[in-house]
Amino acid sequence: MLSKAIENELEAYRIGEKVRELRKDRRMKLIDLGEHTGLSPAMLSKIESGKAVPTLQTLTRIGLAFSVGLDFFFTDENNRYAFGVTRRDQRIRMPGEGKAPYDFESMDYPVHEPRMRTYLAFFKGSTVSPTHKHEGIEFIYVTSGMLGFTWNENETILQAGDSVYFDASKEHSYRAMGTEVCTGVVVALAQ
């Protein structure tokens, strides 16, 4: 018999509810899940209702039937998916690294392990724009001003509303042009 403290701790994971949700999402009956796992429908019913706590081996068998790992049952659902809200007044303007021709504000800092990085960039004017390269793909959407964008030794002028998508493993650089402040949204694959 489980102690009340352990029982309460396990209830927080909602394992039975998660098993039931998986089964219903796949439109399976208890008997169908039993055939896939080798567990009796009665045992599966007890697990789903929280009357029985599955062993790790039993939970693994259930997970395999749905192609999910054990982490599915023990991870907070809110942390299972990438999600984050960044409020305008929470962003902090940071100087670009080294000789970077822009300052930036991270637009995705609260996201746990993001698959891409998103910045609001404030491009600086420069007659000599330093080139750089890195792995991945990058995307820039110019929100105000005019941006001189050089990729693979060719310069393109982008104005507010224009965007560019490019292979960042080729030399590239950017510089603000004209008198209006040049800003843009920059999206790059996380490294």
Image: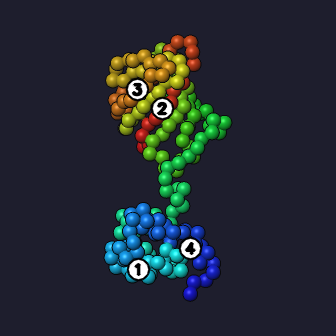
Q: Which residue is mark 1?
A: 41
Q: Cα distance, mark 4 to mark 1?
A: 22 Å
Tell me the amino acid under the disc marked 1.
Pro
Of the two numbered discs 3 and 1 in the rendering, the one whose residue sits closer to the viewer: 1
Q: Which residue is mark 4?
A: 10
Cα–Cα span, label 2 and label 4: 42 Å
Determine which quarter of the picture holds residue 13. bottom right
Name the residue located 52 percent from the left edge and 34 percent from the top edge.
119
- List x then y, in percent, for residue 46: 49, 79
Find numbered disc 2 in the image and state the secondary structure of the residue it sits on.
strand
Question: Which amino acid type is shown beneath numbered disc 4?
Answer: Leu
Q: In the rendered image, which quarter contains the N terminus?
A: bottom right
**For the residue labelled by badge 4, is the local secondary structure a helix, a strand or a loop?**
helix
Structural distance between the alpha carbons of marks 3 and 2: 10 Å
In whole angstroms, how far apart are the C-alphas of marks 3 and 1?
Answer: 56 Å
Label 1's element? helix
Q: Earlier in the sequence, mark 3 or mark 1?
A: 1
Extreme residue in the top direction:
178
Instruction: Give how far across and how far down residue 110 sits, in percent.
Output: 57, 46
Q: Is residue 9 above or below residue 76?
A: below
In the image, 158: left or right of 93? left
Tag 3–tag 1 contact (CB < 8 Å): no
How many other residues sit within 10 Å of disc 1, few (<14), some (14-19) or many (≥20)? some
Pointer 2 residue: 186
Q: CA distance from mark 3 to mark 4?
A: 49 Å
- Sooner in the amino-acid sequence: mark 4 or mark 1: 4
Between 152 and 50, the one lying in front of the other is 50
Which comes sooner in the sequence, label 3 or label 4? 4
Q: Which residue is mark 3?
A: 164
Residue, x 50% and y 20% (percent of image)?
160
From the image, which quarter does the C terminus lie in? top left
- What is the three-letter code of the residue carrying label 3? Val
